[in-house]
Image: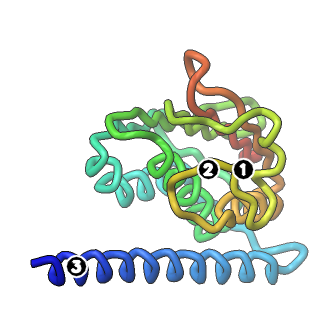
Amino acid sequence: KRQDDERTEAQTSLLRGIDRLSRTVTQMLQLARLEQAPEAPTLVSVDLKEIVAAEVADLAPGALAKNQELGLDAPDGSCVLQGRGDALAVMSRNLLDNAIRYTPQGGRIDVSIQDDGPHWLLVIEDNGPGIPEALRQRVWERFFRPPGLDEPGSGLGLSIVRQVLDLHRGKASLARGAEGRGLRVEIRLPRA
């Protein structure tokens, strides 16, 4: 019985390690592709709402497994901008994945897209632990992870988001979430 438990624990640990390695390799490849993008990449009309909604739907099972509320509030109609749909999907996935992973069991993640004059404003707000203000600029650096995090990760997700924003002339800001808890990520992307 004890050997079976030890074997099961070793297999579980091995699978977690493989999953972490696979995720890190995927993120490194994404970052390399974004860095190889030409100075003036070909941008086409894309619908930010469609892209974000697809990523929310794809990642919803992970939120459900943690009994989290995950919702999207977006304007009626399209949210069109000039961009690369694949890169915007990677950006959305990284932001949503972070929110799901770092928000505790039973937490809440609110995603919204708003008309912000010349920009579309994508907001992802959670009631997780947040990021201390003193570290908010450092989290955009490659391989940087705030101390004390229990969730595994490589520290590449937000540097990938930064590359996508550079490609689209977008801007990001981090702040405390609602009621002084969690994290509020604001992404501004120029409208078409």
In the rendered image, residue 71, in percent from the top left (x then y), is placed at 39, 37
Tell me which numbered mark, 3 or 1, is placed earlier along the sequence.
Answer: 3
**Mark pair 3, 2: CA separation:** 49 Å
Q: Which amino acid does label 3 sit on?
A: Thr
Q: What element carries label 2?
A: strand
Q: Which of marks 1 and 2 is nearer the N terminus?
A: 2
- Mark 1 and 2 residues: CB-CB less than 8 Å, in contact? yes
For disc 2, the neighbor class at 10 Å (few under 14, some 14 to 19, many from 20) is: some
Mark 1 surroundings: few (<14), some (14-19) or many (≥20) residues within 10 A: some
Question: Is residue 151 positioned above or below 18 on the image?
Answer: above
Residue labelled with disc 1 = 192
Towards the viewer: 90 or 168: 90
Residue at screen point 60% across, 32% down: 114
> Residue 90 placed where, x, y %?
58, 65
* Residue 113 image label: none
Q: In which quarter of the image is residue 41?
A: bottom right
Eyeballing the image, is 87 above or below 186?
below
Residue type at mark 2 is: Val
SS assignment at label 3: helix
Circle 3 is placed at which residue position? 8
Residue lying at 56% horizontally and 55% vertically, measured from the top left = 92
* Residue 65 on image: x %, y %: 27, 51
Separation of residues labelled 1 and 2 (CA atoms): 6 Å
Q: Which residue is depicted at the point 34% across and 40% down?
A: 105
Q: Which mark is residue 80?
A: 2
